[in-house]
Image (cartoon, grey):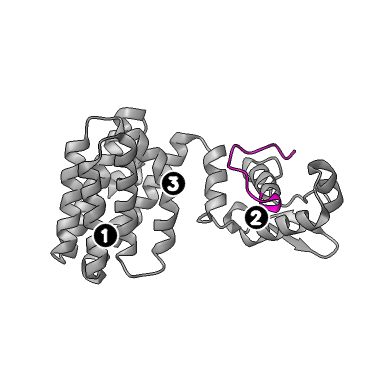
Amino acid sequence: MFRTSVSLRRNVHSQVADRIGLSIVRGDIVPGDALPSEMRICEMLEVSRTVVREAIRMLAGKGLVESRAKSGTRVRAPEDWNHLDPDVLRWLLETTDVDTYLSKLFQLRYAVEPAATAMAATASEAEDRARLRAAYEGMVSAKTNEAFVASDIAFHKNVYFATRNEFFWPIAQMFEITLSPSLTIAATGDHRPRSLIEHRDVVEAIERRDPKQAREAAVLLLQHSAADLVRIRGIDPFGASAAAS
């Protein structure tokens, strides 16, 4: 039941949580079903009861399971999971079809990022704008696709941090995991000169403290990024809802 994840190994209870969590996200154990008993998990994974209990606590903290007296530990519905948790995101990436994942990520970014960019234009402080400018310059000077993607991720993370609104920050923090696949795919295209112009337009609008232009620049950047994925992957990340926007 609990197959090994390809993720990096950590301490023992984290390894156990990783194997159980991946099984839940993969659908091996469906919502409402009970996990095997603590003793059974101990036998299956050859670990102590203390390790299993700590692993279950970790999974409960991520919203994947809940423990109740007399009914054991049961899997919660996906709506209850903490989808911004780094481990949950990683498990989803390992088990979700890449094209489906990319479409959902773009839907989130299209709904939120233009607003965050406009907010950054009015709420950012000098150090926020300096970090954003530095990330952009890193994209300009990148000699490899890997360096370009790393700076691109830093750029978009810093847009969200520059809102000075802590409710946007978890989205920025998840980008380290979630943006890499889509940006790596897009980085193989020939669009980089255009992309640099569009990122520059975002930076400059934020530096001018112009929320309207910042929002418009972010929308254009996202639309063209989606079009790149349509061309490279043959998928439409926006779908009908974005077309209507």
Is residue 187 inside the magenta stretch? no
Separation of disc 3 and disc 1 at Cα? 21 Å
Which stretch appears magenta? 1-14
Name the magenta segment's main secondary structure: loop
Instruction: Using the image, determine if residue 193 lies above or below residue 165.
Output: above
| Amino acid at circle 2 | Leu
Residue at the image point whose x is 25% and y is 71% from the top: 123
**Within 10 angstroms of label 1, few (less than 14), some, or many (20 or more) residues?**
some
Left or right: where 236 falls relative to 15 = left
Nearer to us: label 3 or label 1: 1
| Residue behind mark 3 | 178
Residue pictured at 76% horizontal, 55% vertical: 51
Q: Which residue is mark 1?
A: 131
Q: How far is the residue under mark 1 from the one under mark 2?
A: 35 Å
Q: Mark 2 = which residue?
A: 64
Q: CA distance from mark 2 to mark 3?
A: 19 Å
Decide: few, some or many residues near mark 2? Use Cα within 10 Å; few <14, some 14-19, many ≥20.
Answer: many
Q: Which mark is residue 149?
A: none
First in sequence: mark 2 vs mark 3? 2
Residue in the picture at 27% in, 46% down = 222
